[in-house]
Image (spheres, rainbow, N blue to C red):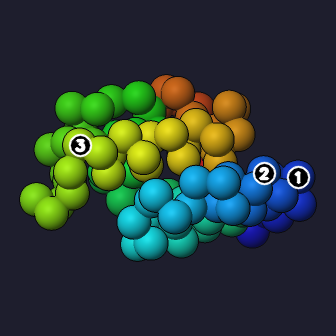
Amino acid sequence: MRNDTRHERRFNAAVAEHGYCVPENFIQPLRRYVIDHTMTGDLLHGILIDNWWMAIMHAHTALTVEDLKAITRFVWDAVPPEARGSHEAVKAWVA
């Protein structure tokens, strides 16, 4: 398991800034993704690879569009650029 304090600091700063907007059950899986390089569930995976269709198809019916937008903003701020944006980037991050 890899651990990079630089990424942890970035993640914690994003939590402090945006965490209140993101449903709590998404923060911990994203923390594990950023800090421990573990794969997320399908909804978060869709957001990480910039595939909103995938994210929406796997979203719980209780999530609103505003929730999805907040999660997306949080991912943009909390996840290093090299760990998001494409399937290849996500695959390399968890490898």
Query: The disc labelled 1 sits on which kind of residue?
Result: Arg
Residue closest to the far left: 61
Q: Residue at x 15, y 63 (%)?
A: 62
Q: At which x and y percent is residue 13?
A: 76, 56
Mark 3–mark 1 distance (CA, rounded to whole Å): 31 Å
Inspect this view and state whether residue 83 appears. Answer: yes
Tell me if mark 2 has few (under 14), some (14-19) or many (20+) residues whose alpha carbon lies within 10 angstroms of its own: some
Tell me if mark 1 has few (under 14), some (14-19) or many (20+) residues whose alpha carbon lies within 10 angstroms of its own: few
Query: The disc labelled 3 sits on which kind of residue?
Result: Val
**Above or below 64: residue 91:** above
Question: Which residue is denoted by mark 3 in the rendering?
Answer: 65
- Where disc 2 sits, the SS reads helix
Who comes first in sequence, dot 3 or dot 1? 1
Would residue 90 be found to the left or right of residue 11 on screen?
left
Observer-side mark, 2 or 1, equals: 2
- Where disc 1 sits, the SS reads helix
Question: Which residue is denoted by mark 2 in the rendering?
Answer: 10
Q: Residue at x 29, y 45 (%)?
A: 66
Tell me if mark 3 has few (under 14), some (14-19) or many (20+) residues whose alpha carbon lies within 10 angstroms of its own: few
Q: At which x and y percent is residue 88?
A: 53, 29
Q: Determine contact: label 2, label 1, CB under 8 Å.
A: yes
Inspect this view and state whether residue 95 appears. Answer: no
Q: Residue at x 51, y 40 (%)?
A: 73
Question: Where residue 6 is drawn, which disc sits there?
Answer: 1
Would residue 52 be found to the left or right of residue 71 on screen?
left
